[in-house]
Structure formats: structure tokens, C-alpha cells
Amino acid sequence: MSGSLADALPRLESAGLDGWMVRLFEEIDEANLAWITALARHCESAFGEALVDLVPSYTTLMVIFDPVRLSPSEAREIIARVLTDLEPEEAIGTGQVHELPTFYDPSVGPDLERVAEHTGMTVEEVIDCHSGKTYRVFALGFAPGFAFMGLTDPRLECPRLDTPRQKVPVGSVAIAARQTAAYPTVTPGGWNLLGRTSARLFDREREGFSLLRVGDEVRFVSVSREEFERQGGDPTPMEAAG
Amino acid sequence: MTQQPGTQTAIRVQRAGPLALLQDRGRFGVRHLGVTQGGPADSYSWAWANYLAGNSWGSACLEITFGGLQLIAERDLEIAIAGADLGATLDGQPVPLWQRITWKEGQKLAFATPESGLRTYLSVRGGFAAEPVMGSVACVGREQLGGFDGWGSKLADGDQLAIHSPERKPAEGMTEAPDQARQDFRKAPVLELLPGAQIGEFTGRSLYDAFNTWWRVDDRADRMGVRLLGPKLQCRIGSLVSEGINLGGVQVPPDGQPIALLNDRQTIGGYPRLGALSPLSASRLAQCLPGQEVRLVARGSGPVLREYRNFLALFRAG
């Protein structure tokens, strides 16, 4: 494998009787995704029917295989072979930039003003800062279709809430540390809410189910309340939590 | 609930009890989307229930946790119950577990409280019928996926449950599990753990404790994971960049109390792990009531794989 990776990497670590954790990197970096998605794609063809699941994340790919068809050592050999001639993908994810229409407003983004205060910016500057950057999807997890994206501008960095909210509304656009996300379903959540998107992030009837995939690029586009509603967004206000 | 072709309403829920869920083998090929696995928390008992009822591997059973469920048959049914002894009765008469029995139209099948174990599996010949969501009927409330309604609902009073119309030919195979296959869930289990990458980051004392302590099952235990109480385990790494977590993964958060992750776990997480329980040990842990004691033992994959393949060979053949 290329010398662009640290010496001790990639590393294969046991993830149980039917799994291997392929550790490709130590640190979070947008450049990791080209390698991780390439590895995932090649594992799909190399394992064929014996593949059960692939879980890509920031620095790793977990490979789950059928333990009836393959022993752990056989699976390990397949992964090692794939790693030997791995090249990073040029076009990663779906290759498209998703634009998520977002209504930034205190009524649906109850932490907007507090984030402005915390970062020393005005609300308008926070919105410009958040919508002015194209983000990369690092991982999906926490809930179906929930995409961890980053990295946000360092000026936007702010901690999670001390006490998570019990119910975060669908479409809520949020930040925490140097990451951003949009909530696909109603779940508890401890991130800072800036606004709401009308985009349908998770749909069980849609081919592929999740709008966003690991490696995809995402931009949040600031829209008016009217445009947000026209696109099917729900403007029901949410009171700021305690 | 719309009736699918080839299915028939067979059972009425008189009282739903605390938690009864429809579970097939689980949801696969979608974990990269953040969708959890689901499926039976005790796959061992689930597989036996299906097999004894004459169903193929993967058929949907009812996973009954703790008991309290009361069901009325609306036609004559062949069934099997395997797993925990929840004091099941048929019109007041005790029901034998781990074997095929007949449940006649109008009879009431009732589950009381746990005598041994926590979860039992009811399989009906033909298999329970529901519309799959993302390839599975496995019911995951948190994700609003699966179950009889498709939206992750547990059973409710008054539900009508459909089954697939069974084939006419009599079911083949054993109708009764051999004695050695019936698990005694009162016995404190020794759980097999395959060591993982971070095991070397735990202090020597913590590793000694991990494998030489009777761990107590906490009451914070559900289908996502089971917390174990005992000596505080110390790891030189506090947290990792989030990565995939497999079934049975034993993670140790900063409070030093391990959590074994089960079927409804989140797909990624960032705590260091001792390793992963074998699939059958994860199933066994799912039968433990709060307060019960368990031991962990480190194992290599060779013998664990042989045992698991032997188990699957009985049920997945054909």
C-alpha cells in the first residue's frame, strides 16, 4: 500500500468471530474517505456472497462476514489481498454535492443565538459560516441516516449540550465540536440546533434509504421561511431547552 | 395492518405484557446507513423454537421478555416455545418448553413471570407474517422499523397476529430438543470473549479482574446492551474515534464498568473494548436477569468457531 499511510497501518484487528476491524488511519481527516470507500467497494466484490455488512467510519472499516462460509483467518487473507493493491477512489461517495435547503432561525434553531454568543459572532455570521463550507460525510450512525459531517470552521467549534434534549425534531441542523449533522428522525440529541432542513434524509421507501452516504459532499443552503415551507419543511417552532 | 396473500390471522392478543416483539434473524446489509441489526437477543433459543415448530431458519418468532403476555388462538396451531421459563400455561395447565405442541382454537396461552431466564421465543408453524422493512420484520422500537405494523411497535392489547399458511405436509425433524440442548438459565454462565485490539491498553490489574471476577448484571440492561457491575477497569485510552461495533462487543466507558452490546446497539461507538463475546455467549447473556452473576473467559477463535458452526449446521441446513 502507498507510503502515504503511517507505517503501522493499515492494521487488521479482531472484531469478534465474524468481523475484522481494518484500521487505516489514526486521525480524522477528509482525505481518509477516498481510501475507506475504495476499501469498502473492493471488499464487496472480493467477499461476494460471504459478505454480511460493512461499517465505514472516520478512520476504519469494519467487515462482517458469514462465519459458515469463511473462518476469521480466511477473511483476514481476503482483506489483506485487497489492501495490497488498494488505490484511493477519485470520485468518492455518490460523487454529487447534496444541497440541503435550511431555514436558519431561532424558532427552529433554538441554540442559534447562544452559539453566536459563544463564538463571538453575530447570528448572520454564524449562518454564513455554517452555510459557507462544503462538508464531507465521515460516518453514518447514532440513528438510521444520521450523517456525521465536517469539519466545520474552527470559529464555529462549540461543545455539546450538558443535558441532551429528549426530542429533537426531524430535519434539525446541528453542530457539535467541529462536526455538523441533520437529524433524520425524531431522537434525543445533545447537539446545538441552528435551523431545520426540508430535505428528506431517511426514507424507507426510497432506493438506498439514506440521502447521504459516507464520502458524500454536503452544503447547507440558507433559505427563507417561505421557501422552506414550499419545499415541504415543517416550521413548527421549538422552544429552547432550559 | 393489511392482510398479505398466503397469510391468515391466527392469534389475538388479550394482554400484551411489558415487551413482546416480532423478531426474524435481523436486518443486514444496511449497517453502513446507521441501521442496527435487531433480531433475537437469544438466537440460540430462537433457532430452537423455529426448528421445533417445523419452520425454516430465519422465520419470525415472538420474543417475549419477562412474561405477562396472554394470547388466544383463533385456529388450531402447532407451536414451540424455547428459551426462558416464564411460567407459560395453556388454559391454566403448564406448557412444556423445547418441544412441539398443539394450541387449539379458543385456548389461552399465558406467560406469567420468569422462573429461569428472561426471554422466551414463541414460534408458530408457518411463521409469523408481517411486511418486511429494509429486508426484515425485526422490530426495533428506537428506529421505528419492523414489527407487525412496520413502525417498530411492540405488541399491544387487542392486536391480531397473522401467520404464513403452513405447508400441508407434516413438519420434519425433531419435535423435542434433547436434554443437553435445553439451557438452564439459573446457572451462572461463563461467557466466551474473543480479545480485541485495545485489550493491551488495559492495566494488568484490570485484565486480571476482568477474567477473575463474578460480574453482576446491572438493571441497566436491554436489547441495546447489558452493563456489568464489578471492579473498575482502567484503560490507558479514554475514547477512540468512533468506529463500527459488532454484536457482543464489550466496551468499557470511563466509569470502568463494561457494557456488552447486543442486537439493538448503535452501529458505531468510541469506547475502548476488551473484545467481543462469541455469538452464543451474547445470546446467553441476554437471558440474564439483573443481579445475576457472570464470568468472562478469554478464548481463541478456533474452538468458538467450531462450536458456532455446529450450532448453525443443525438449523441452517436445507
Image (cartoon, coloured by chain):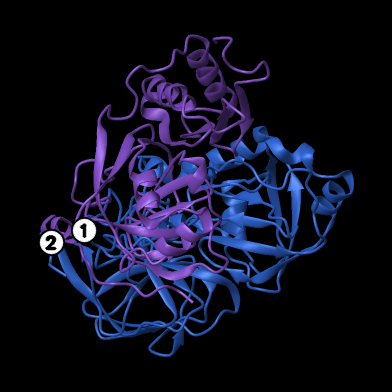
Chain colours: A purple, B blue
| Residue drawn 52% across the image and 30% down it | A29
Horizontal arrangement in the rendering, residue A62 relative to residue A145 (left or right): right
Q: Position of residue A81 (x, y in %)?
A: 51, 13
Q: Which residue is mark 2?
A: B4
Between circles 2 and 1, the one closer to the viewer is 1
Closer to the camera in the image, B283 or B306: B283
Residue A83, compared with residue B60, is above or below; it is above
Q: Position of residue B107 (x, y in %)?
A: 31, 85
Q: Quadrant of residue A216?
A: top left
Residue A67, compared with residue B171, is above or below; it is above
Looking at the picture, which amino acid does disc 2 mark?
A: Gln
> Can the viewer see residue B172?
yes
Horizontal arrangement in the rendering, residue B178 relative to residue B4 (left or right): right
- 10 Å neighbourhood of mark 1: few (<14), some, or many (≥20)? some
Give the label on residue B116, or none: none
Closer to the camera in the image, B127 or B129: B129
Residue A152, compared with residue B114, is above or below; it is above
* Subunit ID for the residue under disc 1: B
Closer to the camera in the image, B70 or A169: A169
* Subunit ID for the residue under disc 2: B
Q: Earlier in the sequence, mark 2 or mark 1?
A: 2
> Can the viewer see residue A146?
no
Q: Position of residue A36 (x, y in %)?
A: 46, 26
- Label 2 and label 1: CA atoms lie apart by 8 Å
Horizontal arrangement in the rendering, residue B126 relative to residue B21 (left or right): left
Q: Quadrant of residue A87?
A: top left
Q: Which residue is mark 1?
A: B131
Q: Which quadrant does the C terminus of chain B fall into?
A: top left
Residue B182, compared with residue A220, is above or below; it is below
Please tell me whether mark 2 sits on a helix, a strand or a loop.
Answer: loop
Closer to the camera in the image, A59 or B176: A59
Whether tag 2 and tag 1 are in contact, CB under 8 A, the answer is: yes
